[in-house]
Every structure is written in C-alpha cells, then in structure tokens.
Image: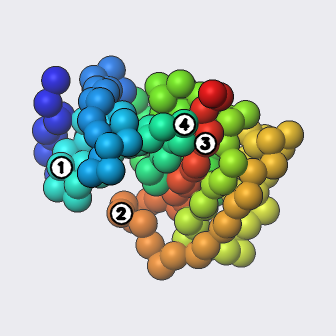
Amino acid sequence: MGPIRVGPQGLSHKAAMKGLSRRLQSSPRGIPMRRISSGAPWEDIVGYSRAVVANNVIEVSGTTATDGDGNVVFPGDAYRQMRKALENLVHALRLAGAGPERVVRTRMYVTDMRRWEEYGRAHREIFGDVRPATSMVEVSRLVHPDMLAEIEATAILED
C-alpha cells in the first residue's frame, strides 16, 4: 500500500494506522532495518518513517495528538494532548514489537514550558515505573497551530 494522499486538512490517521507498512531493508553498513510507515503524505515529502527498527533498537519519530481521522484533538489542553500523543506513540511501539516498558529515552517538544507539569503528568502515567531518560524542550510552534506537544522515543527490543 502506498502513501495515503489527502487534502490540505491532513492525513486520515485511521487510514494511516490501518495501512501501516513494514519494509525490511539494510543500511549502508549492512545492519538489517525495518521501517514502519504510517502512510502520512509528509513521510515521502520529508523523508522519514513513523518508526525504524535497527537490530534491537526502535526509534519512534515525533508523535502528536491526532485522532483516527488525522485531526488534532483536545485543542488547548496540554495534559490530554500529551496523553493522546503518548497513546499514539505506544501504538507505534507495539507495531515495532515492543511496549512502553522497553523505552529507554523520550524527548518531549512543547509549546509552553509553563505547562510542564501537565505534560509531565501524562508522561508519568505511561512511563512512571519505567523512568526513561527524558528531555522536555520548549519550541515556538509545531506543524499545526493547535498542537501543543510532540514526543519521540527510543526503545530496546529483547534479544
């Protein structure tokens, strides 16, 4: 299945998640790599994958609070947006063969650092017992004006 093409309002996230494709390739150094695609049209434009598995490492790209139709959800609600972004991130991890318990590092990009406790509460609810290394960085804006948070993760698969 090729990339899902949609109009300027964005990707149908539901269609993207249904159409997640996996491609096994090798890197230039011969490391087996599996790329997981959400089918988002901007993956081809920018040149990235939702997640990449190389050996036993999973890298999940920046993930935001979008619903099954690709709409930004919970405008203005920092906690609920981060919580939804985390749920979407966990879904990508599961497709790659892991869960939140395998995460060793997260990176949060937020548009208002004054709301750090709201973002942090959602992070703790998913990763409280895991306690991965993390960063929270304030950015001036994300790709959509209603987005308040984005999160990336690194996870390690079991041998």
**What residue is drawn where x is 66% and y is 53%?**
105
Mark closest to the chain's N terminus, 4 or 2: 4
For discs 2 and 3, the disc positioned in front in the rendered view: 3
Q: Name the residue under label 3.
A: 155
Q: Mark 1 points at which residue?
A: 44
* Disc assigned to residue 143: 2
Contact between labelled residues 1 and 3, with CB atoms less than 8 Å apart: no
Q: Is residue 138 visible?
A: yes
Mark closest to the chain's N terminus, 3 or 1: 1
CA separation in Å, label 1 and label 4: 25 Å
Mark closest to the chain's N terminus, 2 or 3: 2
Q: What residue type is labelled 4?
A: Asn
CA separation in Å, label 2 and label 3: 25 Å
Q: Is mark 4 on a helix, strand or loop?
A: loop
Residue 130: image location, x then y, percent: 80, 41
Q: Is mark 2 on a helix, strand or loop?
A: loop
Residue 127 vertical placement versus 144 (above, below)? above
Q: Is mark 3 on a helix, strand or loop?
A: strand
Contact between labelled residues 4 and 1, with CB atoms less than 8 Å apart: no
Viewer-proximal residue among 73 and 139: 139
Q: What residue type is labelled 1?
A: Asp
Circle 4 Cα neighbour tier, 10 Å, few/some/many (<14 / 14–19 / ≥20): few
* Disc assigned to residue 56: 4
Quarter occupied by the C terminus? top right
Viewer-proximal residue among 73 and 113: 113
For discs 3 and 1, the disc positioned in front in the rendered view: 3
